[in-house]
Image (cartoon, grey):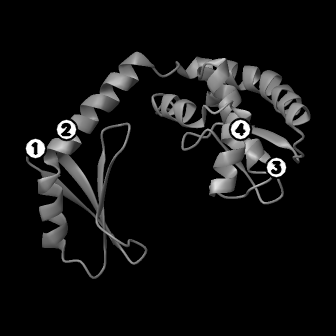
Amino acid sequence: METKLQHPLLGEIVLCQTRRARRISLSVRSTGGVRLSFPCNVPRARALAFLESKTDWVIRTRDRLAARAAAHPAPAPCDIEALRSAAKAELPPRVEELARLHGFRYGRVTIRASRTKWGCCTGDNNLSLSLFLMTLPPHLRDFVLLHELCHTVHHDHSSHFHALLDRLTGGNEKLLSRELRSHSIPAR
């Protein structure tokens, strides 16, 4: 069940009490929106007490996200089509090149305007890539492509998957992953 609450300091908070939740969790969207999720067996008052204990964290996180957005401004709406064209022209050949270089097999490559993740690999080894990859520096773009290609071998984030990705990135998986987290997909 989803409801909204007006917090005196944080503004609108979305409360989501659901059977799927295993614990109380708090998230801040890139837009600054706050979501408090909690299991059905947790009283609303306890979830709200958790929110109160994390008020400073929410404010710091909003500030950090705002600074990140200022450092990496979203492309103008007219740039989306330019990104799409560039992605369609550059990403499939680069995937093919990396796959050939490292011995991966994959299905087809599709380009989407995904704003939730940089890419994904299906069970059939088809790759779906966000056109917003074009906003990343080339070395991070390659890191995402290698990440998805590694999923054609390991369809999970197991230690085997990470070992393979780390080997392919010259032992720099954690460093590149951290650097990738400093970038975000532009919000609408």
| Residue 101 % position (x, y) | 88, 31
* Structural distance between the alpha carbons of marks 1 and 2: 9 Å
Side of 11 where 131 appears, left or right: right
Closer mark to the observer between disc 4 and disc 1: 4
Q: Residue at x 19, y 38 (%)?
A: 59
Of mark 4 and mark 2, the one earlier in the sequence is 2
* Structural distance between the alpha carbons of marks 2 and 3: 39 Å
Closer mark to the observer between disc 1 and disc 2: 2
* Structural distance between the alpha carbons of marks 1 and 3: 45 Å
Residue 167: which numbered mark, if any?
A: 4
Q: Which residue is mark 3?
A: 126
Report the amino acid beneath label 3. Answer: Asn
Q: Residues within 10 Å of mark 4 (few under 14, many from 20)?
A: few
Closer mark to the observer between disc 1 and disc 3: 3
* Structural distance between the alpha carbons of marks 4 and 3: 23 Å
Report the amino acid beneath label 1. Answer: Leu
Of mark 1 and mark 3, the one earlier in the sequence is 1
Of mark 4 and mark 3, the one earlier in the sequence is 3
Side of 43 where 41 appears, left or right: right
Q: Residue at x 82, y 40 (%)?
A: 109
The answer to whether the residue labelled 1 contacts the one labelled 2, judged by CB atoms less than 8 Å apart, is: yes
The answer to whether the residue labelled 4 contacts the one labelled 3, judged by CB atoms less than 8 Å apart, is: no
Q: Which residue is mark 2?
A: 59
Under circle 3, the secondary element is loop
Labels in figure, total? 4
Q: Is residue 124 visible?
A: yes
Residue 41's place in the image compared with 122, above or below, is below
Residue 9: which numbered mark, if any?
A: 1
